[in-house]
Amino acid sequence: MLRVIAGLAALTVCTTLVWAQNPAAIDQRKQAMKALAGALKDPVAMSKGEAPFDLAKVQASLKAVQETAAKAKGLFPDDSKAGETDVLPVAFDNKADLMAKLDKLVADAQIAATAIKDDAGLKAELPKLAGNCGGCHKAYRKPKS
């Protein structure tokens, strides 16, 4: 009888841990972060001189950054702390700061969209925008191994 109770208790704990994970949110969050990186690919190439400056592409990229960063704010539910995620637990402890960083990314992308008119503007504004990524990654992302 004691083994049955212990087995049921273990099963309950394991089931609770599985339910405490939200693989859909984790996957959506991963996709959003990949989309942010993808949105910046063309502007980064342009700023390095690897591609010609194209204002329409820059504007489309900045719009994608704004939309994706705004959407990402909803992809950090508490039940997505565990599982296959690179997000550190401290991100959930400091969620207000994380949300503020995402808001700043949106705002900086809006500023960049207004400020960038040519290659010189891109080279001046892009580092400011990209700095937002590093700010979150240093504080809230597991280091790459």
Image (spheres, rainbow, N blue to C red):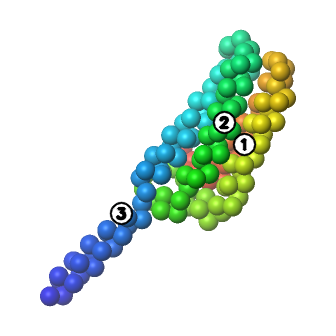
Residue that numbered label 3 is attached to: 18
Q: Is residue 76 visible?
A: yes
Q: Helix or strand or loop: what does disc 1 sit on?
A: helix
The amino acid on which the numbered mark 1 sits, given as a three-letter code, is Val
Give the residue at mark 2. Answer: 65
SS label for mark 2: helix
CB contact under 8 Å: marks 2 and 1: yes
N-terminal of the two: label 2 or label 1?
A: 2
Residue type at mark 3? Val
Quarter of the image for residue 47 reads: top right
Task: Quickly name the residue at label 1.
Answer: 106
Q: Residue furthest top?
A: 52
Q: Position of residue 10 (x, y in %)?
A: 28, 75
* Residue at point 43%, 50% (across, down): 24
**CB within 8 Å, label 3 to label 1:** no
In-front residue for pair 70/11: 70
The kind of residue tagged 2 is Val
Q: Relative to 107, say whether 88 is above or below.
A: below
